[in-house]
Amino acid sequence: MNVADLIDLLLQHSPALIVAIPLLGAFITPLISRLNDKVRNVFVILTLGLTASLVFLLASDVFSGNIHTYIFGSQDLALPVVRILFEVDAMSAFMVIISVILSLIAVIYSWSFMKENTGLDKYYTLILLMTAGMLGMELTGDLFNFFVFLEITSISSAALVAFWTNKAKSVEAGFKYIVISTIGALFILFSIALFYGQYNALNMAMIASAIQYTFLDKIALVLLIAALAMKAGVVPMHMWLPDAYGKAPSSITFILVGATQASLYGVFRVCFTIYGGAINLSSISVGWILVIMGIITMLLGVAMAIIQTDFKRLIAFGAVAEIGYMLLGIGTGLVVMLNPEMTATGLAAMKGGIFHIMNDALDVGLLFLVAGAIYYATKETSLNKLGGLARNMKYTTVFFIIGLLAVSGMPPMNGFASKLLIYESTYHLNPILSIFAILSSIMLLAVFVKVFHSAFLGPALPKFENVKEVPKSMLIAMGAIATIIIIFGLFPELIVNNIVEPAANALINYGDYIREVIPSFTGGA
Amino acid sequence: MIFNIPFIAVAALILIGLYAVIFKRNLIKMVIGITLIESGVNLFLITLGYREGSIAPIYTSSPGGIMALPVPQALTLTSIVIGVAVLALMLSLVIHIYRHYGTLDARKIGGPEE
Amino acid sequence: MSGMSKIVKTISGIAFPFITIYGLYVISHGHLTPGGGFQGGAIVASGCAMVLVSYGSIWIMDRVKEKNLSILESLGAVCFILLALLGLGFGTVFFNNFLVGTNSLFGVVPAVGSGLADINTGGVIPLMNFAVGLKVIAGLFGIVLVMAYAIRTKEGKK
């Protein structure tokens, strides 16, 4: 068979292979790490590289308009649906690209960041398991399968957050994370049981086509949004996020940002696709609840970030504030969805929110990598003890400036494009929302300029005389992210028209998602 | 009325588990509370599959008649396995916390930053 | 932890093979009677934990090294994923049951409905049950062994 047939075969089987290859790699890694350390590192990078190429192959086909479904265990789909189904539409493809890039960069970064630690075979096994869990969460079309992958991701990420077991604070942060995460996941299982009891279906498309908005459905919606928003770090359920992000190794925090956003993807999938048929009855109230949660998250995240003295904890509160932007954008899209004269506003708000998901992962991720580089070089995390590092670590300073400008939404970076879309569209809904958003951006800029001044500028401290620049693999990782940020900032039209707009349309037109599985479904946008 | 007793038991288990997680100070009691919530949700899943007068859904030498739904039993099995993994991880972290602090009281650990 | 008295050691040594045989029966008949990979593996792991408690974790740790358990666990998991990928390799989809009704060993497919069936009618399901059972035995026994050994270190220091 020639190359075109091979690529077609790979494309047809790619949803299953994208999850199966990291899983197989995770189980082989303890066997390979008996040989040599370098062989194991190269094997992990090759596995993730293979997965990334499959992801780009699948995404390039999905963004041109086809929805891919993959049925496990058989080739024909018997209605009512009894088999597990992977359904990839444009929003899933968007999230999968983000997750696999985050994992690949984190593994490249941890080649030298974690070199002096022991127990690294378990570290790489857990990273591959976490990647498989995140990719499965974003590709699946079955609610119980989503719960299983969510638990895989949260267990492996809690074990990785507590990886430095010689520090008491890391273990405590991991314990807090796993307790809160398990209670949320058990409530998700409770609402899945409520759905199964009413509709005798676990498939997302089957539930969406049969949903009537009964009292039990309202309880299930509240439990699902509350539990998934808690895993995404939305105020007032954000208590675990500063501890877990601040005390984990920096490469793990980088992937945790992706896991947090996969849970946010779960919120959007529930609100738009599963409750699509019932959205006529409740979209305004659910949308306003998301908007208000977004505003509170932004303001509280920035307010808590101002008073922090620990470097990574401050960036973690900045990450909390950024999640507020995403909720604000997509909540606005939900509020104006039924209003026929504001469709352009709604589409612009959703494009801004979805684009901000990718931008936030890159920007906040770059800041965390820089914080890790400073910790690797100086073994200090408190801002009171740092100072004058720009003389010794020139590349790291440049990367921090790029990350600072991107997070606060300054023009040549990608944060500006997505935040401008959010400012413009929320202004049409209510001007006060736009004022809060701009205010939070300005306060974020102030906070990070303060951090930049106290960590990098200033007089040279005598104990930092011998600090050298960080090793090459960390610089390559940070440089790759910075390059992507600058490219997205200079050409935002390319990204928004080709990648973000199909994703926004896939969320609004939930009827296409359902019609792939049940061809006779009428109704829906 | 007698068919509502499993649902009342589910509500009682979840509420007692939430009480143990929120109000108790010992870390082991928090872990036991999470196990109680998980048992309550598993019981809820199995109770949904019951049909009145049904037998166990096994084909091997079954006496015939209506069978209870087997899908919730498979879901419950998966949930029990996930619960075992989470419990193992939580207990390992409690062992590490005890080794660092010497106490299991949740008010005494988690002091200010060092 | 240290071992228990001679009577307990003898009785647990006698009971251990019976528990293992029962656990292996539950694993291999998973597609006919209630059971399967995880349930049977948990039974065998309980028997191993009983031996661990009665003989002491120091004695067991000298003879069963933790890295052997890790290798067994990885082998079980790799076999499971390879069996799933073979369904892909034989022309159809991932996780397909490619062995049911094909050759002489697995050729009999029983009718749907109540009745008796043989053990070789499941196709690839009993093989996956064995792989999962091996992984669960090694995994659960490893967890219990490492936890008991870690607590032993704490008590020894006191």
Image (tube, coloured by chain):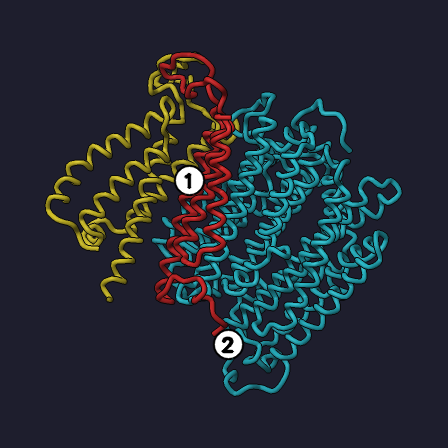
Most extreme residue toward the left is C6
Q: Residue B81 carries which label?
A: 1
Q: Residue A384 carries which label?
A: none
The chain in yellow: C
**Horizontal and vertical percent position of residue A380:** 51, 75
- Within-10-Å neighbours for mark 2: few <14, some 14–19, many 20+: some
> In the rendered image, which quarter contains the C terminus of chain C?
bottom left
User: Drawn colour of chain A?
Assistant: cyan
Answer yes or no: do the residues labelled 2 and 1 have beta carbons within 8 Å? no
The chain in red: B
Q: Name the residue under label 2.
A: A378
**Horizontal and vertical percent position of residue C25:** 28, 28
Name the amino acid, label 1.
Answer: Val
- A311 above or below A219? below
- C15 above or below C6? above
Name the amino acid, label 2.
Answer: Thr
Q: What element carries label 2?
A: helix
> In the rendered image, which quarter contains the N terminus of chain C?
bottom left
Which residue sits at x=60%, y=64%? A316
Q: Which of C73 and B13 is in front in this view?
A: B13
